[in-house]
Amino acid sequence: MKLQGTMQINGQGCLEIGGCDVADLARNFGTPLIIIDEALLRDNAGRYRQAFARDDGDAVIYASKAFSSPAIARIIDNEGLGLDVVSGGELRIALSADFPPEKIFFHGNNKSLPELEYALSCGVGRIVIDNRHELLQLEQISAAGGYRPSVLLRLAPGVDAHSHAYISTGQTDSKFGFNIFGGDALEAVERAWKSPYLDLKGVHCHIGSQIFDLNVFRCAARVMMDFLQEAREHSGWTAAELDLGGGLGVYYTSGDKPPSIEDYAEAIKEAVFQKCKEHKFPRPRIIVEPGRSMISPPGTTVYTLGSSKEIPGVRKYVAVDGGMSDNPRPALYQAAYEGIIANKAAAQAEERVAVTGRCCESGDMLIWDLAVPRVEPGDLLAISCTGAYTYSMSSNYNALTRPAVILVKEGHAEIIVERETWGDLLRLHRIPERLF
């Protein structure tokens, strides 16, 4: 497994993160356990800030759907970044951490009426309008409440990100946004710009996730800039902001070669600058919304090994005390991960195993082929790069409880999300009296 951030193998042959022995963390906090390397998270945030926010008022907005918690929101605010939310719940989490509402962007393709009213009453910085229904609804609410929110229009630029179909969002055939090709986007610009109840700042797109090819980002930036020029010619409106979303890929397994944050920034800015020059268009404020590339590498999930099953000539299965309930990504879209036996991190590999979760599903597989030292029940498996879309996509399938999440830094470990209990599973359930 590739060691990232503050990971190292200590003198006892155990994996350390943030100066903490993972075996000690497992004993103290239990497993499954999600560990967030605070130093690496802050380093990623600082690199994004340095690459974007230092120039011409450009902004970096953390996509909290990757992993949302009050503690993470505090770190993001400490680092001077904004926050992207996609529901009233994520907005509530951010505000519970005293995150400045004016630095929050509210996304979503089907925001409810109460969510829009909540966002307006809180004074969020931007509402990203996804469709005509929402555009009309937001106008009505704003007119009735005396608001004039700053908005962006989400567009579908028709760019295929070449990632898994479930995480490609920028193509023409997508549930998200006004299509550039066909006239929907121009019509939306015309309506929003002339509305006395909306302050149209610019446009937004997000073409997908886990993207390694910088040319895809360049292409999206060019398409969006060409559209802004077309909108200016058509309506006279000049966009002040261009939000290009996120999508930068990260390292999960050998063979993954993600671009650096710095190269990603340079590619986007270069494409925008070229189009500004070509169209004599005033440079818009560039906004990006990294999620996975910010929080995924700092995250590591630790499991305890339990039962095993060896099928001669086929494979050996080893089971852990979590699985698709805390990380559904392998089952959803065949996501691949690396892992290491944390309490035997310095030992040589002696066998290859398939790591299965404990859910009652044949598809509950975390890693199909992992080289490990000779393993036994009670060993600890650490799977790297699990900070994004694991806890945030977790469930109580099979009535399993969600894991604890801890923050580690310089030898200190603190809980930022408590482990669920069986009592938590029953907290919202009721039995009508007539059933007794």
Image (cartoon, rainbow, N blue to C red):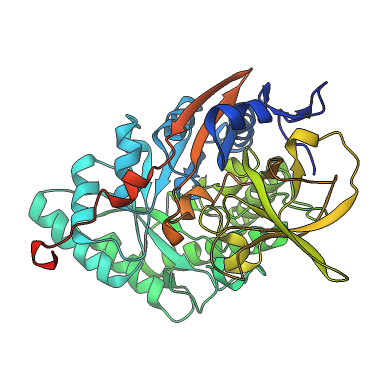
Quarter occupied by residue 218: bottom right
Count of all numbered marks drawn on residues in the image = 0
Q: Residue at x 71, y 54 (%)?
A: 337
Q: Residue at x 54, y 47 (%)?
A: 291
Residue 116 visible to an observer of this rendering:
yes
On screen, residue 208 above or below 386: below
Viewer-side residue, 367 vs 305: 305
Residue 273 point in image, percent of width and height: 62, 50
The quarter of the rendered structure image containing the N terminus is: top right
Image quadrant assignment for residue 203:
bottom left
Q: Is residue 57 in sight in this rendering?
A: no
Q: Describe residue 143's horizontal placement relative to residue 254 as left or right.
A: left
- Please say if 169 is above or below 385: below
User: In the orientation shown, which residue stands out farthest toward the bottom?
Assistant: 182
User: Looking at the image, which is closer to me, 32 or 145?
Assistant: 32
* Left or right for 243, reference 114: right
Q: Is residue 88 left or right of residue 55?
A: left
User: What residue is rendered at 8% in x and 55% in y?
Assistant: 144
Taking the spot 34% from the left edge, 31% from the top edge, the residue there is 97
Left or right: 379 with respect to 81?
right
Q: Position of residue 20 (x, y in %)?
A: 66, 23
**Image quadrant where one finds the C terminus:** bottom left
Residue 351 percent coordinates (x, y): 87, 53
Question: Which residue is more in the foreground, 192 or 166?
Answer: 166
